[in-house]
Amino acid sequence: MSRVRTAPGYGTHPTPRSDWALFLDIDGTLIEHADHPEGITIPENLPTLLMQLQTSFAGAVALVSGRTVEWMDRRFAPARLAAAGQHGAELRLDPNGKTVPLAIPSWRQRLEQELEAALQAWPGVYLEHKPLSLAVHYRAVPQFEAEVKATIAVITNRLGSDVELLAGRFVVEIRQIGLTKGTAVKRFLETSPFAGRLPVFVGDDVTDEDGFGAVKAAGGLAVAVGPRPTDQADFRLGDPGEVRFWLASVVAESMKAEAAR
Ligand SMILES: O=P(O)(O)OC[C@H]1O[C@H](O[C@H]2O[C@H](CO)[C@@H](O)[C@H](O)[C@H]2O)[C@H](O)[C@@H](O)[C@@H]1O
Ligand SMILES: [Mg+2]
């Protein structure tokens, strides 16, 4: 596998192969972070880029995110991809198929009520309501991190053993135990058109480590985005702008190869 480095400031990335199965995280990987989950900007050419990638890899491209699949469809329209949402709690193996919720947490309503009440103590902390999970964001007020995390731990401890906390950057995701980006990737790799391809996972955060682990266990490659240290990365790109630039070059290569056939 050759390692490519281009202009200064541009990270390392693998040489593309037409037999890749590509797994893409969203926030911090395809799009730049913003202070609020709905404050992000979708670059104008991103939906087209995603559709071109689907063509380049015969449909073997999936979004694997903490976001809901409904959010992905709405914000990336007209692009519609295979997808795993809410950190593996929902799955859509076929872009034209239905999204399957894999976990309906029994504790969600009680947790929502208790968190809503408790988090009022820290103005600026935002509770994101997702159907199968909840996310507590403290990006706007990072000074409250320790107190917010301690409070979440106390509340979730009361809810039983099937609750899992997942700490990301300025966020604590609360979800049903046992489903991760890694379990989602494994499921994709058992299914056409992903099965039999070389899996490549691109992600920026601690929640992507499960995805990295799953592709590496299948002989694939992990591409880290941004500065967060990780032992699993084979390659590293600096930020979502570099990721999009790289993916566009992958599409261009694939179109050139197709035209030469
Ligand atoms: O798995 P990802 O695609 O990386 O999604 C992870 C979470 O992303 C969103 O939250 C994060 O991005 C927001 C916008 O930049 C930012 O304001 C927040 O602090 C970040 O945690 C999203 O809101 C979550 O639902 C995702 O799980
Ligand atoms: Mg991310």
Image (cartoon, rainbow, N blue to C red):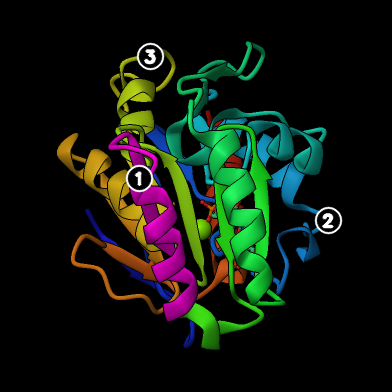
Secondary element at image label 3? loop
Spatial separation of the CA atoms under disc 3 and disc 2: 31 Å
| Circles 3 and 2 in contact, beta carbons < 8 Å | no
164 vs 55, nearest the viewer: 164
Ligand 1 quarter of the rendering: bottom right
Name the residue carrying label 1: 164
Dot 1 or dot 3, earlier in sequence = 1
Residue 127 point in image, percent of width and height: 66, 57
Name the disc covering residue 191, or none. 3
Question: Three-letter amino acid code at disc 2?
Answer: Glu
Instruction: Give the label on residue 44, or none.
Output: 2
Q: Which residues are magenta?
A: 146-168
The secondary element bearing badge 1 is classed as: strand
Q: Position of residue 154 (x, y in %)?
A: 38, 59
> 114 and 10: which one is in front?
114
Report, in whole angstroms, how far the alpha carbon at label 1 lies from the one at label 2: 36 Å
Looking at the picture, which amino acid does disc 3 mark? Thr
**Measured from the top left, where is residue 125 in percent x and y?**
65, 71
Which residue occupies 56% across, 38% down? 110
Count of picture labels: 3
